[in-house]
Image: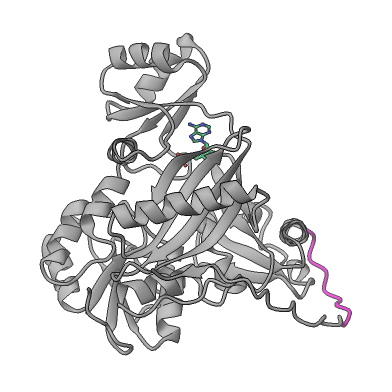
Amino acid sequence: MSKIILPNSTVGVFGSGQLGRMFAIEARKMGYRVHTFSPDIDTPTGQVADVETTAAYEDLDAVRAFAKGVDVLTFEFENVPFAAVQAASEIVDVHPKGEILHVTQHRLREKTFLSENGFPVTRFRHIKLIDDLYHATEELGFPCILKTAGFGYDGKGQVKLEAPHDIEAAFAAMNGEASVLEAFVPFEKEVSVVCARDAAGNFANYGVIENEHANHILDVSTVPADVSANVRSEAVDIARSLAEKLEYIGTLCVEFFLRGDDTLLINELAPRPHNSGHLTFDACATSQFGQQLRAVCGLPLGSTEFYGPAAMANLLGDIWKKGEPNWAAALSNPSIKLHLYGKAEPRPGRKMGHLTALATTSNGARTMVSEARERLTEKVSYSRRPTEIPPTTPINPSSTLRAR
Ligand code: AMP
């Protein structure tokens, strides 16, 4: 049983991106102080935290000084070097524990853990030498995907191989790093389960979220996912077993491929709040960030009740290509919520913010966020007509919170 970290205490966050920012907003709402640590300055998290520490993760003296100033520590992205988390753990509790970070920050370790523990996972092979790749492509067939074993996200460090003539170039693209070859999964759709577990073993989940990707980056998420009841319960059961196996404390996301025969394969784990769960910020009684806070602070998990079907559309830097987006046009639908992460430089592919909407159906919500996003690139018009604000969506009474 972990100790209770009461409001007005200080929560530390390794990492300083948008996930830390939304976590910090929830933490501040509940009266906590937030310190963030990363090599960057004026960061999405730092802008809303009490203290922003800028130092390299390899600077273990700075890490230890940071750990001494907080009552509990968590992380908002999994590429924090394990040594930093280990050094901090000697001073203060870190949740989820460093061993989980160590497994999930490395594709090979993660996939090995999953397959050794009987979880359904894409077929994979460890690649060190070019001969391994020749051999593995014979076993797994084409197409297949070669991915760097460590430090990859949003499709970075990935190459698709269509035929044997792609082998040499794909191997060269890994720059001598250890990699993992995965069979290409002809999936029907991608879904995720965002869930939380506390030290006592209580488990809460947000059901199944449906995810559409563009260029390997999450584009739109909707709930409830259009999947069968069997898939829904199997996906949640897998997430629960994983959280238990890992003795997980915090928010966890399990990303799945759903195949045409209704079977699930785990694509990857995120040991933190996840982009597909951003819609919980507006659409649920307790967001995935609030849940992370409650779990790491030893407070009871909150209700995961959805106020209604919801959708989220990511806003990438590409939207800024022709100048400042037309925010007023996107917000002309009063049901649209805008989140921006405070990033100064809108680079292509960079996650700058997102839009969410609630509606009476998930398709309706999906259409709303997509249309609002399209309006962002409309020419700015300065004349605005008064609009009538419709009443709010009624609360959906079904809750998915479960306690053991
Ligand atoms: P990842 O960063 O590994 O999650 O990959 C990003 C996206 O690439 C996934 O969400 C899928 O859309 C696609 N992808 C990755 N691995 C595979 C695979 N083995 N088969 C089919 N699509 C994949």
The percent position of residue 361, horizontal first and vertical second, equals 76, 62
The answer to whether residue 219 shows anywhere in this view is no
Q: Quadrant of residue 134?
A: top left
Q: Position of residue 117 (x, y in %)?
A: 31, 40
What number of labels is visible? 0
Colour treatment of the image = one colour
Decide: is 360 above or below 27: above
Q: Residue furthest right?
A: 385
Write the residue at 60% across / 56% down: 314
Residue lying farthest to the front in this orientation: 404
Indicate the position of residue 317 as horizontal and vertical percent values: 58, 54
For image coordinates 20% across by 52% down, the residue present is: 82
Judge by depth and name the residue closer to the eye, 261 or 87.
261
- Viewed as shown, does residue 234 lie left or right of 149? right
Tell me the residue at 30%/16% (across/down). Answer: 132
The magenta stretch is 378-386
